[in-house]
Amino acid sequence: MEQRGVAKWLPWVSAPVMLVLLVIVWSLVVSVFGISEFVLPPPSAVAASLGELLVDPATWGHVQVTVTEVLSGFAIALVLGVLGGVVLGRIAWLEVAMRPALVAFQVVPKVALIPIFVIWFGFGLTSKVIMAAILAFFPILLNVLLGVRSVDRGHRDVMRGLGATRWSTFRNLELPSTLPYVFAGMEVAIVFSVIGAIVGEYLGGNEGLGFLVVSSLNALDAPALFAVIVLLAAVGSVLFFAVNLAKRLVIPWHESVSEKEFA
Amino acid sequence: MTEHLLRAARSEAELPQGYDEPATPADTLTPELELAGVDKVYSSRRGTTEALRGIDLRVAAGEFVALVGRSGCGKTTLLRILAGLLPPTGGEVRAGGRPVWRGGRRDEETVSRFGLVFQEPNLFPWFTIEDNVALPLKLRGVDRATRRARAHELCDLVGLGGFEKSLPRELSGGMRQRAAIARALSCDPSVLLMDEPFGALDALTRDRMNLELQSIASTTGATVVFVTHSIPEAVFLADRVVLLSPRPGRIHSVVDVDLARPRELEIDVEPAFRETVRALRTALDEEA
Ligand SMILES: Nc1ncnc2c1ncn2[C@@H]1O[C@H](COP(=O)(O)OP(=O)(O)OP(=O)(O)O)[C@@H](O)[C@H]1O
Ligand SMILES: [Mg+2]
């Protein structure tokens, strides 16, 4: 019981401690080696830049654009990935038939497709949403496919022994046993959607946090560049923890949710 | 009809001695469970395994039959065939006189009277113990309050009182198995099919569960087929002990247990008990 308590509060202590250590080491490195501000600005300069950034309403407009792209792409990927995973998981021959296409599409470096999407859909949100969706789609599809396949045989026997209908087998067995896989896919997918949206913004358009990164770079403003990256990391973390929280609420019974106890 | 009587007469002839006393329920017209010439061959990519050959078994309503045999001799296979979870590759399976399989489809109505306990607890990790125990009632559309009340009753019965709200992962292996037994009992099955249900329990709990099972079987009048590795357990519980011999699984012998009920745990010092156990041990030894 005590150890459980430790597992609960330890990350809340260790994370700030590591952050403080990072900032100290960073400041020391900059001052001891006399590194130029254009290469590695000191934390104080980044913090000042970040402060300016946070009070500028335009920044929040960019955050909103990026979050919209990420969430739209993620939502599309979630719907299509779950549908695709269930269909392929159920129909074995279709999965076998689709396998070469899936492998081919997986090994293509998908961010290389962004210029094509820019040609097709322009510099607006659409091309970034599509990129975010494509990157997020595969982890969801593959996890759901695995989840549908891994319904426990013994559990199936229980339902069959009870003469359960298709619907109650789905409701009481298949859905709950696949949900952990859906969430595992979603946790990877939300991170991938952020990557998709940001890389999309790097390559085209004049909105979003990715665009802010590029414009700071063009202005040779290293503290601003670092500040935007910090902001990006914060936005990515918030999105990830939102998915993680949803998981904790929906499948509190699952092993991945219970606090790990130390041996 | 004549065909049925003929078959009944034939199996009568095959029954072991001491089986002709009038009170024996197996004499009544339709047996509750019946296997006639059942074969089972598993086919996989690596080849085929003949798991069962020519099994003839009749279990009367209210009878308690124990199935013993070495590991891998086909006990689970036989039980799954009885339960309608596995179609036989040959022969006929009947429950209450009705064929369980008709043209490759299972007769759901017959099967729904069964309560099954598997070798593993097979509890659903997303349900609390209470919800696991009441799952069969949920599938029958029983309302929540009734389900909860019944689940509490059953948890008390199997010694899990106070664990109703726990998740399966918070219970020990033996406790999970007891929850699985409670689940099987929840819809008052007229036939109980149990695959080594007490294998994971400590000796004391096992004794207690044996007593409990005996009283459940006699108060509900349920027909029980019970797989076990333990010969004393089989003798303690059963009216008849069926010994399977391995590869392919066949019925080696059937031994009647003529001990009065209710049986107490101390029955194991009685000569009749010891004699039956010894006879089964000898049979098991000579078969190998
Ligand atoms: N699904 C399967 N596919 C192929 N062979 C199987 C399958 N299930 C069981 N067998 C084979 O059938 C034989 C009987 O298996 P079964 O599980 O019925 O044995 P058992 O008597 O229940 O053993 P135990 O006491 O160890 O539980 C074994 O030789 C096993 O290898
Ligand atoms: Mg077995």
Image (cartoon, coloured by chain):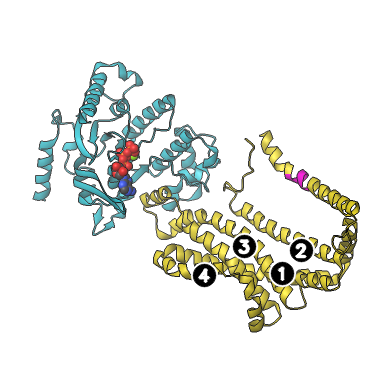
Chain colours: A yellow, B cyan
* Tag 4 residue: A104
Q: Are marks 2 and 4 in contact (CB under 8 Å)?
A: no
Which chain is home to disc 1?
A: A
Q: Specify which label sits upstream in the sequence, 3 or 4.
A: 4
N-term mark: 3 or 1: 3
Q: Position of residue B109 (x, y in %)?
A: 31, 53
Q: CA distance from mark 1 to mark 4?
A: 24 Å
Give the extent of the magenta segment.
A11-15
Q: Secondary structure at mark 1?
A: helix
Residue B245, x across and y down, in percent: 23, 35
Task: Identify which amino acid the numbered label 1 is placed on.
Answer: Ile
Residues tagged 1 and 2 counted as in contact (Cβ below 8 A): yes
Mark 3 near mark 1, Cβ–Cβ under 8 Å?
Answer: no
Residue of label 2: A232
Chain under numbered label 4? A
Residue type for callout 2 = Leu
